[in-house]
Image (cartoon, rainbow, N blue to C red):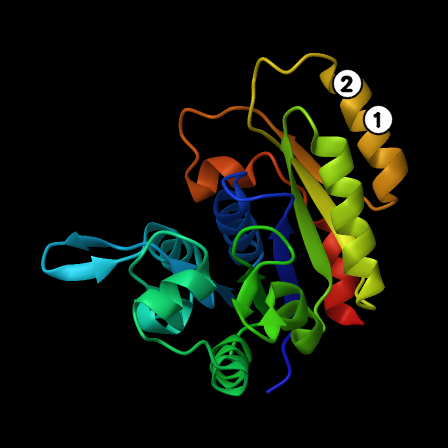
Amino acid sequence: MTLKGFFITGTDTEIGKTAVTAGLAHAFAQTGRRVAALKPVSAGQDFVDGHWLNDDVERLRAAGNLGLSSAEVGALQLRTACAPHIAARIEDEAIAREPLLHALRWVGGRADVALVEGVGGFRVPLNDHWDTADLAADLGLPVVLVVGLRLGCINHALLTAEAVRARGLTLAAWVANTVDERQPHVTENLQALQRGLQAPCLGHVPRLADAGHATMARHLVLEPLLGHLSS
């Protein structure tokens, strides 16, 4: 099945990719579209009420509106909280390219909008010969970049954008997510990011006490993304 949607990546790990992906999913669902928010590879689970669960997968499952199961949202969920290729080695699990792509296309193809969240930054190894940049290229989806606003974010964002375009992918938009609320010169940072990234900004998200998908959606705009869905 052919996917329509976006690949969500970030300038680093722990910079709010899942929160932004969930917010986008909620916003698209509010327009009446069928939305699948997916995280094909995750690492780190907790044992809750008799089940092993990944928090990111559960947040995305709740944000979509197709009634997907945890296994459909997160095709491969590893228990060890570390880089996925290391977790897979520890758990004697193979991260295999074709089965993962098949699962993504099967589930995501049922949606009007598939939001596929990567893991960590843009170039995280999945096995010895395949990384998350390869995954994004295999899917061929336009990319939304989540920029964690903190010291060093301009360099990280511009390098990531360069890597995205080097793979022949479109940087559709970016989101500024406040990681360090004490960061100085925020306006100047945002201006530099806008000039350097040369893509529309979907929103500047403040530090939120409640980062639920409905709250996050209120800080994001969808208009710059809509043209990519009709192309």
Foreground pick, 11 / 1: 11
**Horizontal side of residue 31 vs 56, given as left or right:** right
Foreground pick, 207 / 131: 131
User: Local crowd at mark 2 within 10 Å, few (<14), some, or many (≥20)?
Assistant: few
Q: Residue at x 63, y 16 (%)?
A: 183
Name the spot of residue 91 as percent of width and height, x first: 30, 69
Residue 67 visible? The answer is no
Callout count? 2
Q: Residue at x 74, y 13 (%)?
A: 185
Q: Amino acid at mark 2?
A: Thr
Q: Which mark is residue 39?
A: none
Q: Which residue in the rendered view is the most extreme toward the left?
A: 50
Name the spot of residue 144 as percent of width and height, x first: 69, 53
Residue 46 visible? The answer is yes
Q: Can you say which quadrant of the picture contains the N terminus? A: bottom right
Q: Contact, CB < 8 Å: mark 1 with mark 2?
A: yes
Q: Can you say which quadrant of the picture contains the C terminus? A: bottom right
**Horizontal side of residue 221 vs 46, given as left or right:** right
Q: Quadrant of residue 132?
A: bottom right
Foreground pick, 42 / 194: 42
- Work out whether 26 lies above or below 92: above
SS for callout 1: helix
Residue under pointer 2:
187
Q: Residue at x 48, y 86 (%)?
A: 99
Q: Quadrant of residue 141?
A: bottom right
Residue under pointer 1:
191
Q: Residue at x 46, y 41 (%)?
A: 214
Q: Amino acid at mark 1?
A: Gln
- Work out whether 16 lies above or below 37: above
